[in-house]
Amino acid sequence: MSVEKRRLEAHRWLAQAWDDWEAGKALLERGKHAQAAFLAQQAGEKALKALWIALGLDPWGHSLARLLRDLPPEEAPAFHPLLPQALALDKLYIPTRYPDALPGLTPKEAYTEGEARKALEDAQTILKAVEVRLGKG
């Protein structure tokens, strides 16, 4: 894939990441905390995959922490400080969606407004960092 095609594809992934983030904000306002938290995770994942695509790499998996840790050495210093946010979002991938993921609780019962808000803040930090990086080239 040419550099220009990679850049365009990366921007498509980042646009979807922002759309997921906005949907998460709307769900937060409706009191749908588990769903908002899950969309925060999805937004962060898609943003990091956008970065990988821009770099000509093949992103795989759903772990934001792995996507950060496996970045090329020249990109790592700018993104490794985001590891705490990535780890926090990784923990939302499954239990925000499945009623059997948390003992005795459904996601609807388990997630609070504060947790969903924090997840969206963490995702926004990642999205902005990727946006800055993609804006460079």
Image (cartoon, rainbow, N blue to C red):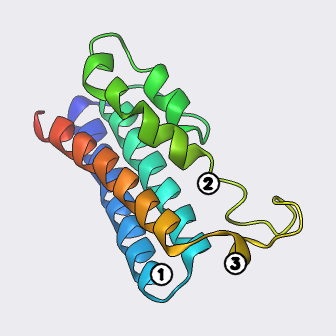
Q: Front-most of 95 and 57? A: 95
Q: Secondary structure at mark 1?
A: helix
Q: Amino acid at mark 1?
A: Leu
Instruction: Where is residue 35? Give x, y as percent.
Output: 58, 73
Residue 39 image offset from top left, x and y in percent: 51, 65
Disc 2 residue type? Leu
Q: Residue at x 62, y 69 (%)?
A: 111
Residue holding disc 1: 27
| Residue at image location 61% in from the left, 54% down from the top | 92
Local packing at callout 1 (Cα closer than 10 Å; few below 14, some 14-19, many 20+) is some
The residue sitting at 47% across, 40% down in the picture is 86
Per the model, the C-alpha gap separating discs 3 and 2 is 13 Å
Q: Which mark is residue 108?
A: 3
Q: In the picture provided, is 65 more to the left or to the right than 93?
A: left
Find numbered disc 2 in the image and state the secondary structure of the residue it sits on.
loop
**Residue designated by label 2:** 92
Is residue 125 placed above or below 65 in the rendered structure? below
User: Of 112 and 44, which appears nearest the observer?
Assistant: 112
SS state under label 3: helix
| Residue 16 % position (x, y) | 38, 61
Select label 1 or label 3 by which is in front: 3
